[in-house]
Image: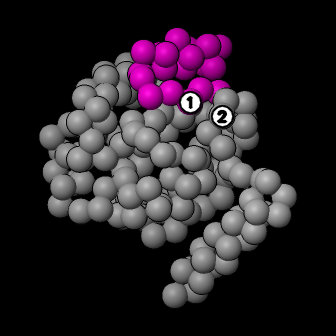
Amino acid sequence: MKNRQLLTAGFALSTLLTLVCGFTFSSREGVEIPLKQVESYVYADTLNLSKFKGRVVVLNFWASWSKSSRSENKNIVRVYQKYKQNPNVVFISVSLDTDQTSWKNAIEEDELAWPDQVCDFKKYESPIALKYSVNTIPKILLVDTKGVISLSSAKIIDLENNIDALLK
């Protein structure tokens, strides 16, 4: 209950900052992502991006009901296979699903083997989707070792070259 109150207060504050100051969280490249804990997710009870600072993070927004997301998941799995042994690269999938069974079935079917699978079943009203201005999926954010978004894309094609460049 306390976490829900804190989340509600945080959302109200970010809304107020947006209205009064024009401040918003964005998925634009070069924007530093806020590294704070987000509560109430299922597979990963929390999404604490600060624990990944110093590593390259592939943040994949998708949903089981999105045909283009499901298609792009095949490419993400291929990229994951390439980097899964590299401890400096982390994959996180954030689902915008509303049905837990469909979400879990899609994870299995698409072979999303990385451990960080999160969903709060709020679709586009999810605090993390709102925070990163996700209004269409699939959407992939590539976060550099300093916690700054270096790529925002709907396609995986740009991802590999950018990961390699960030690892140098």
Q: Is residue 167 magenta?
A: yes
Residue placed most toward the observer, 101 or 154: 154
Whether residue 153 is visible here, answered yes or no, is yes
Query: Disc 1 vs disc 2: Cβ atoms closer than 8 Å?
Result: yes
Q: In this rendering, would 137 be left or right of 108?
A: right
For disc 1, the marked residue is 152
Mark 1, residues whose alpha carbon is within 10 Å: few (<14), some, or many (≥20)? some
* Image point (66%, 44%), residue name: 26
For disc 2, the marked residue is 28
Span colored in magenta: 150-168
Give the quadrant of residue 45.
Answer: bottom left
Numbered circles on residues, count: 2
Circle number at residue 45: none
* Image point (63%, 20%), residue name: 166
Q: What amino acid does circle 2 point to?
A: Arg
* Image height of 151 relative to 117, above or below: above
